[in-house]
Amino acid sequence: MSGTPKVQRWIDLLAALLAHRLPVTFDELAKSVPTYLADGSIAAGNPSPTLKRMFERDKVELRELGVPILSIGEEGSDESAYTLRTREFYLPYLGIVSGRGIEKPTTVDRYGYRSLETLAFEPDELEAIVQGARRVAQVGDPVLAEEARNAVRKLAFDLPLGATDGPGDALLVPPRKRADPKALATLGDALFRRKRISFSYHTIGSGSSADRTVEPYGLFFVSGHWYLAARDVEKDALRNFRVSRIDALKVNATKAGTPDYEIPRTFSLRTHAQSRQAWEIGDGDALEAVVEFTGDSGAVIAAAALGRPDSSSATLRRFTVRRTDSFARWLFSFAGDAMPVSPAALVNEYASLVERTRTIYAS
Amino acid sequence: MSDTASAQLKRVLHLIPRLADGEEHTLVDIAAKAETDPAELLRDLDSISDRFDDPGGFIEGVSVFVDGDTVCVNASHFHRPMRLTMPELCALELGLTMLRRERTPAEQAPIDRALERLRQTISRVPSNDRHEGTRYADLSDAGSAEHLQMLRRAIAGDRKVELRYRAGGATESTTRTVCAHSLAFAEQMWYLVATSDDGSLRFFRLDRIEAARALEETFERDASVGMRVQEAGRAFVSDTSKRMTIRYSPRIARWIAEREGQPLADDGSLTMEHPVADDSWAIRHVLQYGPDAEVLAPETLRAALADRLARLAG
């Protein structure tokens, strides 16, 4: 069988850090990590530059994996010392609140385990976590699904959590054209490292593809599709890209460890991505539209519910509209059961739609 | 960073606490608990036991003894799993955010509490900031959260439900009793997936359910229902033989082609058939595209549209 020496070294390093209550220098740590002893420079009392570089890389990579190694003193200097606090590394004891109080897991009464706190979950919180993990498993991003699965595995060390692979109480039916999982993984990595990316994007409105260079700000899953929110470098504007229409994706490979950009502090992905109706999305000024709903079919009642009441009549509903063309087409689909009352621009748009469509069936 | 090494470390840190009690465990049992296969389990154990005979320094590390199909591990410093990482928290947060939108205010409370507690379990490293706020998920409004709550309970208990429902084209509500199998989100909308007494599959848009009540009567769950929905790829499975043929103009055909997985014609248009279970649905479907969608057949539907448009123009 072939092993991975790096994992062995990392485990040894973690054990060495966890064994020391107080910060220790690299020279001291190295004595407990066999790989670090291999070139003999530690025994000679003068750690080699190669060995120091290896340790620096190990620290960076372990921190990226979430291991909170703390440096005391100037990072990387001979005098700096390192510590991994048990309370900050080990999962707290996880208990369950029950009618009899808090049911705690079996504790380990030695080493640093005694200092761990107990965090108690209520049964309905556990149910929410399992259902949440099931939702994540269905959104089509294997990296996210694996992260959620890892989290649940850790929690399940103490807690009775069920399987998270099934759909649970809701099934997310994927669209026919799904985002490529590899593209999602690449975008996620570029986003984390704040690296510029370039790709060919198929703009469905024009039916053509064009090369784009963008700075990723976030990935969001709305209405069953994954989108990338990013600043288009050439246009200097924030744009959304449906991930399933991205092709030939490349990440800027220069200075891999250095971010190419920062996401503005004012940017909120949650606000940016909040579900909106098609007519609410656009660069135009917002108009207040009034619509009269006269039909009583299920479709019309559900549509009317999307608007706000108008004090003058129970049949009138008000909408905030940025794209009159899109809104007019939506109203048109109700075939006269939802008629625009104002503004005039919307009424005219609707009338034009009726006339142009009527022409088709005139012959 | 080597993905293999990092992925392996995650697995090893997950594995050791389950084994590190000095007792013998069978590989098959542990592989099942770790949701891996025995071969990968052995590879992971091998990766941390290569230098078992090397000088161990002053710190008690990890010792692994594999004997046939059993394994025994001593690892004083790995009796507990590592805290959750920020990417793990963010993944769960994404799921909980989606869940929150579907729940009543009372049901949102445990979701918020769970998230708050999960935040207390994460490890704090400087790179956490680079993960936070970079993912978001939101399906859409799900209709009445109270109806959803009741339907979830009925689904969990395999109970039949009584629905007062107003179909898209119906001007009056009807009351029906169905077996509630699951909730489904498809094509930007939430549905109840149910079967009627004759076993036929039915979809009910949640925003058109006017009232819902769980009955005491239970039903036997049919595992194939979920499969049928997945295969259909949409919330519409119909055995109707009625069809309409629509030509979508080149201006909009690309969107329809992408959604339906159909090829475009040479002129960029798309002509395709749709099953029609309900004429009013057919009219709504066509009119939403205005002059960019034309019904080619059947003639009766063309005539109905022409009549409706004449009245609108009048």
Image (cartoon, coloured by chain):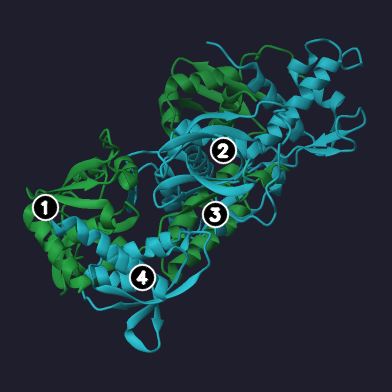
Chain colours: A cyan, B green
Residue drawn at point x = 69 percent, y = 51 percent:
A264
Say whether mark 3 and mark 2 are on the same chain: yes
| B290 versus A152 height, above or below | below
User: Which amino acid type is shown beneath numbered disc 1?
Assistant: Ser
Cβ atoms under marks 4 and 2 closer than 8 Å: no
Instruction: Categorize mark 3 by other alpha carbons within 10 Å: few (<14), some (14-19), many (20+).
Output: many
Q: Which residue is mark 3?
A: A95
Chain ID of residue with mark 4:
A
Q: Farthest residue toward the bottom?
A: A312
Chain ID of residue with mark 3:
A
**Where is residue B262 shown, x and y percent of the image?**
26, 37
Residue drawn at point x = 8 percent, y = 51 percent:
B298
Q: Which residue is mark 2?
A: A188
Say whether mark 1 and mark 4 are on the same chain: no
**Where is residue B188 shown, x and y percent of the image?**
35, 54
Q: Which residue is mark 4?
A: A348
Using the numbered discs, state the Cα–Cα distance from disc 4 to disc 2 in whole angstroms.
45 Å
Of badges 2 and 3, the one in the foreground is: 2
User: Which amino acid type is shown beneath numbered disc 2?
Assistant: Gly
